[in-house]
Amino acid sequence: MKKIFLLLLLSFTTGLVAQKKAYKEGEWLKYRIHYGILNASYATLHLSSDNIDSIPVYHAVGKGQTTGFASIFFKVDDTYESYFGKYDGKPYKFLRDINEGGYTKNIEIDFDYNNDVARINDIKNDKKLDVPVHDRIQDIISASYALRNYVNPDDIKIGESVDMDMLFDDDGIYKFKLKYLGKEVLKTKYGKVECLKFRPLVQSGRVFKEEESLTLWVSNDLNKIPVRIKADLAVGSLKADLDGYNGLKNQFKIIVD
């Protein structure tokens, strides 16, 4: 369960062809996460407006916490924040402050596009590092919003993949790949929802059983919000379902029988 919230954020990265903007300030999403038979945790993602050095940005805050019985065995308290441009979608600042069963990390990243570097501040260990980046880099949260504007099922072929470079840690740039699997109708607490089905390719080993252990369903409407996430972990399985939403830019489409 150590990577539960990071897994959820990674799963928000979807996209291919530009369309009408999929989000607006004030959007709030909530997910109920099950680990096996346990209601393990909740995760939320909230979007507001801000400025960094006179640049208009969105400020996205993601939080994840274990609850109830699960927190007795493994406590998770994670916060991720991203400040990304309202007009160019580029990340300008990223923060990661996590406590996962005693494993802690407190990272700040400032993106300096004038010098093509990301300045990483490892607050916990009092270390600083500059990593070369290009102007198409994303952090894990800014990617989740930027790519929601690029999903169009009419322009994606089943089996096609999208590649992207992400930086969210002092481990360097992460090569992310997403494969489109087609459409599927899911039963949710809100009713039936037509979704686009994706398979992010992840690194197998300590967390995931295989490279294709993770499956993601996003709403096939103009919002393109994640509706369900399932993963086979090295130990057990995980499922996350949309449990609440507010302030969506577009109508959330429910199939009426």
Image (cartoon, helix red, strand yellow):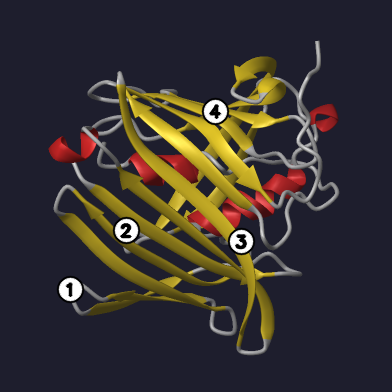
Q: Are marks 2 and 1 in contact (CB under 8 Å)?
A: no
Front-lying residue, 225 or 143:
225
Residue 244 point in image, percent of width and height: 57, 40
Mark with earlier residue (1, 4):
1
Whole-Å distance between the Cαs marked 1 and 4?
Answer: 36 Å
What's the mark number on residue 171?
2
Q: Amino acid at mark 4?
A: Arg
Sequence-first disc among 3 and 1: 3
Q: Quadrant of the N terminus?
A: top left
Q: Amino acid at mark 2?
A: Asp
Relative to 247, 121 lies left or right: left
The part of the image, by quadrant, that contains residue 108 is bottom left
The reply, left or right, for residue 207 in relation to residue 91 is left
Q: Earlier in the sequence, mark 2 or mark 1?
A: 1
Q: Quadrant of residue 88?
A: bottom right
- Label 4 belongs to which residue? 228
Q: Residues within 10 Å of mark 3 (few under 14, many from 20)?
A: many
Residue 47 numbered mark, or none: 3
Label 4 crowd (10 A; few <14 / some 14-19 / many >=20): many
What secondary structure is marked by label 1? loop
Between the C-alphas of marks 3 and 1, the distance is 29 Å
Which residue bears the numbered disc 1?
A: 125
Q: Are marks 1 and 4 in contact (CB under 8 Å)?
A: no
From the viewer's perspective, tell me whether residue 148 is left or right of residue 91. Answer: right
- Residue drawn at (73%, 58%), measured in percent from left and top? 24
**Marks 2/4: CA–CA distance:** 28 Å
Where is residue 56 drawn, in percent x and y?
70, 79
Q: Nearer the viewer, mark 2 or mark 4?
A: 4
